[in-house]
Amino acid sequence: MRDRHRMTRAEFLRYSVRAAGGAALLSSSLKDLFALDIRHGAGSIKLGGRTPDTVLINGTIATMDPLSSTAQALAVRDGKIQQLGTTAQIQALADNETIVVDLKGRTVTPGFIDTHCHYQFMGMMGNYWLAFIPPEVTTIAEFQDALSAVVSELEENEWVNGYYLIFSDGRWPDKYDLDAVSPDNPVFVMHQGGHWATVNSRALEMAGISSATPDPTGGIIEKDNSGEPTGLLYNHRAMDLVRRLIPAYGSEDIRASILYAQPLFAAAGLTGFHDNNIRDPDAIQVYQQLTTQARVLQRQGLFYTLEWPNDLERALGISSITNDYTRMGGFKFLIDGQGPTFYTHEPHDGETWDMSTWEAQTFKDTVLTLHETGLQICVHCGGDAAMDLALDAFENAMNVSPRSDPRHRIEHGVISTQAATSRMRDLGVIVSTQPQFLRLAGDLYAGIFSEDQINRIIMTREWMDHGVTVSLGSDTPTTLWYEPRATIYGAMTRVTMSDQVMGADQILTAAEAIRAHTFNAAYALHQEGSLGSLEAGKLADLVVWEVDPLSATPEEVFRSAIDLTMVGGEIVYLGPRSPRRHLGA
């Protein structure tokens, strides 16, 4: 029996950090970069123009088709899968112009699609936003030292715009912590999760926020016992009161951040993604420009986020294109926040439990209007009351303005009711969730939510068993891990940072997790006819694994690497030749 050693928190983080490097795009000889045998076919040139461009032989092709079929080899032509079969069958198709990839027993799966990430923002974390995170910053005192160093290089009134993750002090910084080292420069530092921030007194003053300022609808300006703002702002509408004053990033910043993320995603085996938090229409235009310039390495689904009711007019005016690489998926709402502000039916011990970020009727009316565009609607739902409100809005829209198969989506779905599972199935609503939330925040959840609420967290097994389509993603950079191997590991183990299993009855098999990250992910954007499984006629988006993820332990999956990533028949990533790392190295 295999040793099912469970990784410690330190080991897990160490492998995560190491995996962030090493992305190598094609720039020299394939054989110099890759341990696989890649060569040209030795056969004679065949007439008729139907010889494949590339064949992959001597492996296991895990197709993820409806029958879970496997093959030994496949052929690619004109960016699509031409044929699957035995090595002999596929090798016979090759001529001396065909690239032959000898898999040497490796496993091939469809390329992974991240159905919930903030791709554009990956490159801005550490650029537009300054990082105050572990291992360099682990205490509020260290945070103050790092902030002081930044401020010393700035002109008076120049903004500090950054983010933090966690402090061993057991609390979040407040305005007094920031004022002590930055009395004259306005400071805005958000939690990496993106749903609350701390600002200093100078920033509060510039924004006109005082003890007399009421909370905006759906947001919280935290105040102390005397009624003075503490500097903590919860949910985007409260954060926007200050954030609107910070100098905005431009199109070139957006372009650079997108280009930054591409090789990282390619090295992780990601061939597509859905960017679920685009607040600037310019970003949609930049994505589309890069597509027309043939500068993209992944297929992209784009969702414009509405934070305020007056965002609707802008949303309806967005122009978009749709092709094999870019698809305007639709629109995104956030109906509650992160753990401390989850909107739930029963109380929890966070900041607030009974507040949605949108007034219910305004939300339903806005969802109906966007439903009538024919596009999809995604709703961020942390708590069970948030999910029920989103389902109410979807059901109302579909009753008032019937559409065939709209495939609206619940994003995250952290806490839900069993009744919501049946409603999602009946409405054809898709769940786009992130099991690695349990690794990152499970211990925090245990300190906020009741036992009944904990027992209803990320119900992947229940959803699947009841016929709800479940797709998987990373929510990067809100989470620490963008790699599908981390998502699969999370779905297969559901362990927290303290190595507690949270919801063992909801664990998925490797095959289920991979299918949710490939075929179901394509289905989540109406693309299952061309993506998500390795079948003749579909686009040739695939990855070659270092290990067989279908038979490996969860720990082996997490420690593994991707050896090759192909998008549309083009190799966009080759793994390094060096020996792989081992647990504890």
Image: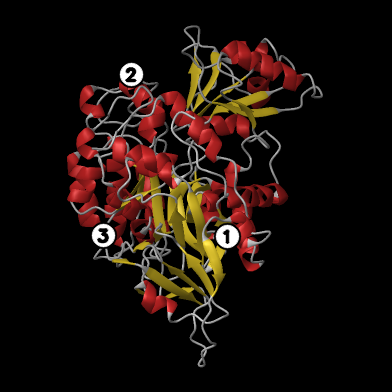
Extreme-front residue of the structure: 42
Residue at 24% across, 28% down: 453
Could you say where residue 130 lies in the image, as x and y percent from the top left?
66, 30
Kind of residue sitting beneath label 1: Val
Extreme-bottom residue of the structure: 47
Could you say where residue 394 lies in the image, as x and y percent from the top left?
31, 53
Kind of residue sitting beneath label 3: Asn
> Which color mode does the image show?
secondary structure
Q: Nearer the viewer, residue 507 or 214?
A: 507
Q: Marks 1/3: CA distance?
A: 45 Å
Mark linked to residue 447: 2
Could you say where residue 291 lies in the image, as x and y percent from the top left?
61, 64
Q: Is residue 113 above or below residue 101?
A: above
Marked residue nearer the N-terminal end (1 or 3): 3
Q: In which quadrant will I find the N terminus?
A: top left
* In this picture, residue 160 sits left or right of residue 71: right
Residue 92 visible: yes
Label 2 or label 3, whichever lies nearer to me, is: 2
Marked residue nearer the N-terminal end (2 or 3): 3
Say if mark 1 contacts mark 2, CB within 8 Å. no
Residue under label 3, please give it: 399
Could you say where residue 526 lies in the image, as x and y percent from the top left?
38, 64
**What crowding class fits label 1: few (fewer than 14 Cα within 10 Å), some (14-19), or many (20 or more)?**
many
Residue 301 visible: no
Q: Is residue 540 above or below residue 230?
A: below
The number of numbered discs placed on residues in the rendered structure image is: 3
Residue under label 1, please give it: 572
Q: Marks 2/3: CA distance?
A: 40 Å
Q: Marks 1/2: CA distance?
A: 43 Å
**What crowding class fits label 3: few (fewer than 14 Cα within 10 Å), some (14-19), or many (20 or more)?**
few
Q: Is residue 168 above or below residue 513?
A: above
Mark linked to residue 452: none
